Image: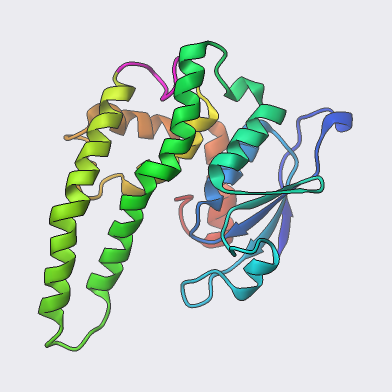
Amino acid sequence: MATTTGNASNDEAAKPKVTLFWLDQSRAQGMVWLLEELGLDYDLEVYRRVDGLAPPEAKEIHPLGKFPVVKVNDDLFAESGFITEYLVDNYGEWLKPKDRASLMRYKYFLHYAEGSFMPPLLVGIVMQGVKNAPVPFFLKPFVNMICSGVETKYLLPNYKTHFDFLESEISQRPWIAGEEFTGADILLSSPLILMKGRSIFTQGNYPKLWAYTEKLTERGAYKKAAKKTEAMEGDKLF
C-alpha cells in the first residue's frame, strides 16, 4: 500500500480531508478524475489485485471489499454514484445542473451508469475471460458454444439497446445532462471508454457518442488523472 497526494484549490478553512482507496483496474480510476475536477486535495491509498481479485485486506476498509471507497473527514463512502453525488453536492456545485430538466437527467444518469449500463458490459468481460481461459481441448467447443450463446442472445441485444439510447441522448445536447459538463459525464465515462472500439461501439455505428467519448478524454482534469493512474498502474486510465 502506498500514499500520494493530489492538487489543492479550495480555501484552507473549507477544505475536507479526503482519502481515496484505490485498486488497480477498477472504477476507482473515475474517482481520481472526479477529485481532479473538484480541485480537492486527496490522499491515495493504493491496493493491488491478488490473482485478479481485490486483496483480502480490502474488507478492512469496507465489509464488501469493493472499490472505490472514499473517506471524507470521518465519513466513509462506497458506490461510485453515491460518492459522486456526495462530493458534487458538497464541494462542486458547478458539476451539477441548475435547471430542473438537466438536473433530472443528471440524477438519472448517475444511477443509470452503474445500475443499467455497466452490468452487461461486466458480463461481457467475464465471458471473454471464460472464452480465453485454458481448458482441455475437448471442452473448448462447449465453452465457445455457451459464450457465443450468451453473446448472441443477451450481450449484443443489450449493447445495441444501450448504445442506441445513448447515441440518441447525446445527439440532443453537448453533455449527457444538458449544456454543461457534470459529474454524470464522469460516471458514464468508465463504461464508454472501456467499450470504445470494442464490439458494436465503433465510430461508424455511433458517431455522436464516439465524439462525446473523445471529448471527455480531452478534459484537463481527465489528463491529470490519466497521468497519475498510468504512473501507478502502467496502463491507461480505463
- 149 or 94, nearer to the observer: 149
Q: Residue at x 48, y 60 (%)?
A: 25
Chief secondary structure of the magenta portion? loop
From the viewer's perspective, tell me whether residue 210 is left or right of residue 22.
Answer: left
Residue 72: percent from left, percent from top:
75, 44
Residue 57 seen in this snapshot: yes
Q: Taking the image as drawn, is residue 193 in sight?
A: no
Towards the viewer: 23 or 65: 65
Q: Horizontal placement of 122 versus 159: left or right? A: right
- Residue 109 placement (x, y as % from top left): 44, 31
Which residue is located at x 14 percent, y 54 percent? Answer: 153
If the image is split into quadrants, where does the N terminus sit? bottom right
* Above or below for 186 versus 114: above
Task: Based on the picture, tell me whether residue 226 belongs to the magenta stretch.
Answer: no
Left-right relation of 23 to 211: right
Q: How many marks?
A: 0
- Is 209 or 160 nearer to us in this picture? 160
Quarter of image, res 23: bottom right
**x%, y% of residue 9?**
76, 30
Tell me if residue 174 is in the magenta stretch: yes
The magenta-colored residue range is 172-179
Could you tell me which residue is drawn at 50 percent across and 36 percent down? 186
Residue 178 horizontal/vertical position (percent): 44, 17
Residue ID at (60%, 45%):
32
- Is 118 displayed left or right of 230 in the figure? left
Which residue is most to the top? 99
